[in-house]
Amino acid sequence: MAEVILMPKLSDTMTEGVVAEWHAKVGDKVSEGDILAEIETDKATMEFESFYDGILLHIGVEKGGSAPVNAVLAVIGEKGENIDDVLKNASANATPKEEPKEEKSSPSPEPVAAPVVKEEVVAPVAVSTPAPVPVPVSSGNGRVFASPLAKKMAEEKGLNINQIQGSGDGGRIVKRDVENYQPAASFAGPVGQESYTDVPNSQMRKAIAKALTASKFSAPHFYLKMEVDMDNAIAARKAINGNGDVKISFNDMVIKAVAAALRKHPKVNADWMGDYIRYNNHIHVGVAVAVEEGLVVPVVRFTDTKGIAQIGEEIKDLAGRARSKKILPEEMQGGTFAVSNLGMYGIEDFTSIINPPNGCILSVGQIKQTPVVKNGEVVPGNVMMLSLSCDHRVVDGAVGSEFLQTLKGFLEDPVRMLV
């Protein structure tokens, strides 16, 4: 008997999915556990396995097409089986796609298509031909009649006296002719071709845009900045990595320091829930990771209970699977605080948009060598800028400042966050 496969709900916020790729075509034999398709959700692109053995008899959503959750995705059955009644019943029983109230009148999103390159050839611009410049009066031997002053002025201005029309007696070129002379404009040059590429927004890009727009315009952001002396952190990292057993990054040290500081400042480890503020007793730090289609925030759970090396290995694993689209939706949920680091791109200072419902996000710049004052003397130093974006509904300025001071202390004296 034919089995109907419906568009799965692969994340808690998913309302529709896009088929990024089919790994089988109609008529192919598939087995339970085979990768049937890749489904793009609002959070990631995930492989979807077949739950049945049989022949792929029908594909309900073509590659690049979108469909709401519980729409008919495919039908698997026996070769030659009639599936008309099965499709009719499945379509009748499919749960309609739920939409937010404010979006009820919005049309269904267009299927995600391949990038379309449009070109517009710009026709040569029609330029009116200027009236012919009268030829200056000259003597029979080619000499141009001009006053000595007019000749001197033309020479100083770099003008060709032969191109200037005289207005004096007998067409003689005088001072005012040189002063009023305007060289004919030249419009010669190649005609270019305008072109552009329209790339349909992926489900992930739409979700990012929706969430961050809501965050930016609903959460009253304010920003706190603080410089950190990283000399001791550099020395500590060098000593740890010199051991040979483990390798840690500065980002790993920042994440560990953040977790330790959150434990001392629980009011920063909070979420805005609308009617109430949730103060989390557990610490789950989300780490922003750039992927091809945007930005995802995998979560290191119970970060404060883990060592720097363990945090580093976990971040490396999560980031790798995020970039290869193998990360699970639940691995990007539940963060209580977020960190975005652009230091590796040479960015010294920036601010981030809060990842809702979190109350804060930390922006980390590059470590920059610069002159600093120590013990009354100007010496070379290594500083890093931290910027804390706060939702004023959750975190007040004093609370955020105290958190940054503690974080600065941990990074400037790394041994303190290990005890």
Image: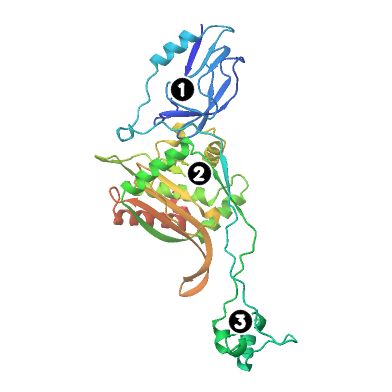
Counting labels gives: 3
In the rendering, at what x and y percent does residue 142 appear?
A: 73, 85
Which one is in front in this view, the residue at disc 2 or the one at disc 3? 3
Task: Decide which of tag 1 and tag 2 comes sooner along the chain.
Answer: 1
Task: Decide which of tag 2 and tag 3 comes sooner along the chain.
Answer: 3
Element class at badge 3: loop
- Which disc, if any, is residue 289? 2
Task: Decide which of tag 1 and tag 3 comes sooner along the chain.
Answer: 1
- Which disc, if any, is residue 165? 3
Element class at badge 2: strand
CA separation, marks 2 and 3? 69 Å
Which one is in front in this view, the residue at disc 1 or the one at disc 2? 1
When asked about the image quadrant of residue 76, the answer is: top right
Compared with 180, 185 (above or below) is above
In the rendering, at what x and y percent does residue 39 appear?
A: 51, 28
Q: Is residue 341 visible?
A: yes
Amino acid type at circle 2 is Val
